[in-house]
Amino acid sequence: DTAVSQTPKYLVTQMGNDKSIKCEQNLGHDTMYWYKQDSKKFLKIMFSYNNKELIINETVPNRFSPKSPDKAHLNLHINSLELGDSAVYFCASSQAGLGNEQFFGPGTRLTVL
Amino acid sequence: DAKTTQPTSMDCAEGRAANLPCNHSTISGNEYVYWYRQIHSQGPQYIIHGLKNNETNEMASLIITEDRKSSTLILPHATLRDTAVYYCIVRVPGASSNYKLTFGKGTLLTVNP
């Protein structure tokens, strides 16, 4: 029944590793997003995809590569992890058009050691 | 997106109405007012949005002033579970250039027993 799900919920890894976070939505939405919330609790957009096409890339380092195999999935792959990547990452989805309210997943807490 | 100003924090007694203000004096004619909240350790949750008329749903009411330069989110009977950070966001929904939410610092509402 979960509308927007993310896996894993927690991710602890060493600097320099490569990791992926998966996101799936079962709401039939055509737009998906990745947001980052840092230690100071600021929530910031990273990427948005509409119908599997990249719409927004908010000056995110190219170590971050989103991949949307279909409209229901938007995965985030991160290469060469750095200490500053430690944060909570939220996936969200919405249906483009009037209203366009976004539904968020539970978040993935990434800790880079 | 128009800039918004919210108080950093507010307190409310359980069972009483919580009135959360937001100033958006530079709002343009086609921008809507959205409210989201984030309960600790969870993803943000959509609450309500409106253009110029007052809106009500099962969660809250939104009162927008006639000049649209400010608004108030009302939780009619606050409960302890309403303790969260509340974000006021103004944006044009569905615009192709606006596939994102720009979060400010929000208001930490603490509901006290």
Image (tube, coloured by chain):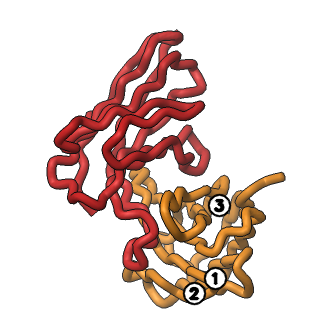
Q: Mark 1–mark 2 contact, CB under 8 Å?
A: yes
Q: x, y percentage for residue A10?
A: 70, 59
Q: Which residue is the site of mark 3?
A: A108
Residue A77, numbered circle: 1
Figure check: B92 above or below A72 = above
Looking at marks 2 and 3 on the same chain, the residue that comes earlier in the sequence is marked by 2
Depicted B29 relative to depicted A30: above or below = above
Tell me the CA gap for discs 2 and 3: 16 Å
Q: Quadrant of residue A13?
A: bottom right
Question: Which residue bears the numbered disc 2?
Answer: A65
SS class of the residue under badge 3? strand
Task: Sort mark 1 into few (<14), some (14-19) or many (20+) by Cα contacts within 10 Å.
Answer: some
Q: Residues within 10 Å of mark 3 (few under 14, many from 20)?
A: many
Say what amino acid the circle numbered 1 marks. Answer: His
* Label tally: 3
Comparing A43 with B52, the one in front is B52
Chain coloured red: which letter?
Answer: B
Can you give x and y, in whole percent of width and height, for residue A27 in the image?
73, 62
Q: Measured from the top left, where is residue B42 in percent x and y? A: 61, 46
